[in-house]
Amino acid sequence: MKIRSVKGTADVLPGQQAAWSQVIDAAATVLGRAGAGRIDTPIIEYAELFERGVGESADIIVQKELYTFEDRGGRVLALRPEFTAGVLRSYIEHGMFTLPTPVKLWTHGPLFRAENVQRGRYRQFHQINFEIVGLDTPLADAEAVHLMWATLAGSGLHGHGMKLGSVGDPEDRAAYNEYLRTELAPRATELTPVSQERLRLNPMRLLDAKDRGDIEIIKDLQRPLERLGTAAREHFDEVRAHLDAWGVPYEIDPGIVRGLDYYRRTAFEAHYQGIGAQSALGGGGRYDGLIEQLGGHDLPGVGWALGIERILDALAQEAAATSESTVPRQSPNAPPSLFLVPLDDEAVGEAAALAHSLRAHGRVEHAYQRRNAGKGLKDADRSGASHAALRGASERETDSWQLKDLTSGEQRSVSEQVLVDLLTARDAR
Ligand code: HAM
């Protein structure tokens, strides 16, 4: 029996790397220009961090999605299911509250949730994550929303839309949950078991129900945005005013609720139609109170995460629709690269030796056995190189190589120095 990859995990093959880099590079540019510092936190943390961080009624905890294990010392560790808790743990541990406010941090990498696998929902997946710590003003929320939108635009996407809502202050949430409990009590037994569990632990999450029967039961109930307290309402209106002034496109979603417990006030998501049921490219919101809950000072924060697999899915949909490739295999501006073809046995060693020295200047590959010119040029083409250089007895006599431009077909005899010049992109013609 062949050993296969674990269900819900995927390999990122060489041919997919350019698309991944395109998205991650866009995030680095957009978020770096906004003053965010890159941070990397460990993949394993104490399980308690997430239990305290995401909250006991978060989907990750209720649906038992956390991968946990005991280490040799009997401590319970977990694979991170999201970035926020770990990033804030690091912020507290390294005393970043002494830095000028706000502290903006971004990261990307793999996360793990024991999910029911489907399109857009995996057990190992990847996010780009951004946090602004230390500001409680609506301006920070608006900046976060704008940067999420801009990161998607920067990665080449056009058709994404932002949804904006508010889950209110803790007291608004408590009152709203009470409202749902009262309204739904007479029909509770008609709900699916998952929704009944949500009604018990965190009724607001019912608004995310996917079951038709559940949707019918809740459809006429008021949404959190319609029951905000004055402070949360004013905050929300100010966030909107900033986004309107900047021309960031968004739509209001009065029923936006997030799967993690820590959100207060602003909650938002980025969506893309056409990538299946999991249309959220990312989500985020304000989480005042979370840093204190993790043992830090009482500091506010706002942030978001984008799912990289879902962005790539959306980019592929757009590329298919416009029949453009998302990322050209070798962009026209890419530096020249060389494939060396030994035409006789002696040239095999010469090609390998030359490749080793030329790699100081650029990408150089070679055939590992004698090739005739036709086969050697085919190898060169398949490698994606821009040029091939061939060597046999006659080139050895003149200490030269036959250089062929694989795009134009132009061919000429050159010295090794010309190959160096070619790779260093100095004009070799
Ligand atoms: P989240 O909504 O749980 O938020 O995840 C954000 C995004 O990660 C989702 O919209 C989706 O694109 C992607 N994602 C989540 N789970 C999966 C999965 N199983 N497979 C594939 N993609 C997935 C958070 O994680 C928060 N920590 C965001 C945040 C940061 N809030 C404040 N700061």
Image (spheres, rainbow, N blue to C red):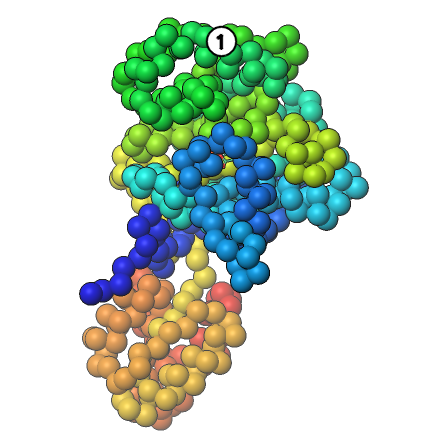
Is 98 situated left or right of 42 in this image? Answer: right
- Which element is circle 1 on? helix
Is 147 situated left or right of 323 in this image? Answer: right
Answer above or below: position of 70 versus 188. Answer: below
Taking depth in this image into account, of 18 and 285 the one nearest to the observer is 285
Q: Position of residue 354 (x, y in %)?
A: 43, 83
Question: What is the total number of numbered labels drawn onto the structure image?
Answer: 1
**Residue under the image location 21 percent in, 75 percent down:** 375
Q: Position of residue 324 (x, y in %)?
A: 30, 41
**Residue under the image location 61 percent in, 9 percent down:** 229
Answer above or below: position of 134 versus 77. Answer: above
Q: Quadrant of the N terminus?
A: bottom left
Using the rendered view, name the quadrant where residue 298 is placed: top right
**Residue under the image location 59 percent in, 23 percent down:** 264
Are there few (<14), some (14-19), or many (20+) residues within 10 Å of tag 1?
some
Q: Position of residue 235 (x, y in %)?
A: 64, 15
| Residue to which mark 1 is pinned | 179
**Residue under the image location 69 percent in, 34 percent down:** 292
Taking depth in this image into account, of 64 and 305 the one nearest to the observer is 64
Answer above or below: position of 232 versus 136. Answer: above
Q: Quadrant of the C terminus?
A: bottom left
Mark 1 beta carbon near ligand 1 (under 8 Å): no
Using the rendered view, name the quadrant where residue 51 is placed: top right
Q: Position of residue 219 (x, y in %)?
A: 35, 10
Taking depth in this image into account, of 315 and 391 the one nearest to the observer is 315
Q: Is residue 147 visible?
A: no
Q: Is residue 352 visible?
A: yes
Is 328 situated left or right of 101 in this image? Answer: left
Taking depth in this image into account, of 418 and 334 the one nearest to the observer is 334
- Which amino acid, by three-letter code, is at mark 1? Tyr
